[in-house]
Image (tube, coloured by chain):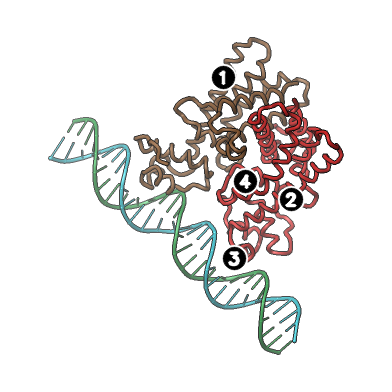
Chain colours: A brown, B red, C green, D cyan
Amino acid sequence: MPQDLPRDSAQRILHVAEALFAQHGYAGVSLRKITAEAKVNLAAVNYHFYDKESLYREILTGRLREINRQRLALLALAEARTGDGPVPLVAIADALARPLFLPASGTGNAGTRLLGRILSERQAFIDELIRVEFQPAMTRFGQAFRRHAPGLPPSDFLWRLSFVIGALHHAVVTLPDMPAHTQGLCRADDCAGALRNFIDFTVKALAT
Amino acid sequence: MPQDLPRDSAQRILHVAEALFAQHGYAGVSLRKITAEAKVNLAAVNYHFYDKESLYREILTGRLREINRQRLALLALAEARTGDGPVPLVAIADALARPLFLPASGTGNAGTRLLGRILSERQAFIDELIRVEFQPAMTRFGQAFRRHAPGLPPSDFLWRLSFVIGALHHAVVTLPDMPAHTQGLCRADDCAGALRNFIDFTVKALAT
DNA sequence: GCTTGATTAATACGTCCGTTTTATACGACT
DNA sequence: AGTCGTATAAAACGGACGTATTAATCAAGC
């Protein structure tokens, strides 16, 4: 499966490595596979990114930062439209999921799979990275959701939030496999349908 | 963290390997780490289980088969109690999640984390194993859920089912980290609370 | 008591890993 | 033209990996 690679070799490495990490995990990908597929010299990773861990971190931070930036921007937009009252659940769920299902044009959605992979892999050296990149967005979305369930005990609310996040990540990760799992009834390229269903699902699950 | 190991060395390998695979994934665990922690000789894995892949498969099949056996048993019990009508959503969700959150006494719940890990790791050589072990249970549960949403388009229903499964797996995998994520508001040992919340969540999300 | 089959132990093999080192090519500037 | 910082290339390093081989141990059965 040949793909149009960027001219710059550092960019080629980032591009190829992201796809491979998303598919096989950190430990499952060797620098030799990356450099071979990116058609660069073996030492190029160490030259441009210092070492394998740094390359991984760079890819991750880039993706996570962009995704959460978009999420917060969409949420802020919805809040501005709403005024002082609680933002509608539909808008919150949309802001949370849209950057995953419908990534900004040009970035491609293959990289999105990384997110789900990472959270279940829990490499020790990226724990802090995940905390730093996710914490701000998650507290903001938590607050927004919370206004729709003010009476719920805190732990119960946090459990429901965790379920919603889990549903989202699982959907993103398994999206490419959905046609096989559903005998073709769910298509992998129907991101809009996936987003719509996630929003419906979340609204029903979190509505009081 | 010393743990009481079984006498038999093959059992010790299974016990230790399951915990390590659950924590670091297949590629992230070496036979040397397993055999060292299990206090057996390096060659013991190859002697008792032929090779690393076979050891992995054996652990997985054991866990998955038992979990899905319990799930189907609970579902059958609920169906018997219900008669001809649709099984209440509460009972279906309970049958689906209980074997994960409250594993049969003696088995310990550390091994349960494997499940969530596996589904996001997607090693090629266990794809068929997963299909074989999960297919029967999933179609049965799908049918049971389906009776509560007969009017929904098939693809929409399958998406919701996927979200429920994702929420469940994510909860299981991140259960040990919940206290840290929630500043202690959700406890890792409160499996009963997690189960109760999952059932509530699923009922709300799938009710028509 | 010796033999036999099953287990454990010790060690070696070949491969692949991440990384380092050394050498070569290229472009811009004086 | 010549120099210098940057990028690519080629090769090698030590170490960890999964696995294979061989030797030691040990518990029955005769």
Amino acid under label 3? Ala
Amino acid under label 2? Glu
Residues B181 and B27: in front is B27
D14 horizontally vs B50: left or right: left
- Image quarter of residue B157: top right
| Residue A156 coordinates in the image, percent (x, y) | 76, 29
Q: Mark 4 points at which residue?
A: B118
Asked if one can make out residue A117 in the rendered structure from this viewpoint, the answer is yes
Eye-nearest disc, 1 or 2: 2
Q: Quadrant of the C terminus of chain B?
A: top right
Chain to which mark 4 belongs: B
| Residue A170 coordinates in the image, percent (x, y) | 62, 35
Number of marks in the rendered image: 4
Residues indicated by labels 1 and 4 sit on the same polypeptide chain: no
Q: Which type of secondary structure does the marked residue at label 3 adopt?
A: loop
Amino acid under label 4? Ile
- For the residues labelled 2 and 3, the Cα–Cα distance comes to 28 Å
Q: Name the residue under label 3.
A: B43
| Residue A169 coordinates in the image, percent (x, y) | 61, 34
Q: Which type of secondary structure does the marked residue at label 1 adopt?
A: helix
| Earlier residue among tags 2 and 3 | 3
- For the residues labelled 1 and 3, the Cα–Cα distance comes to 56 Å
Chain to which mark 3 belongs: B
Q: Name the residue under label 2.
A: B66
Asked whether the residues under the numbered discs 2 and 3 touch, taking CB atoms below 8 Å apart as contact, a structural biologist would say: no
Q: Name the residue under label 1.
A: A74
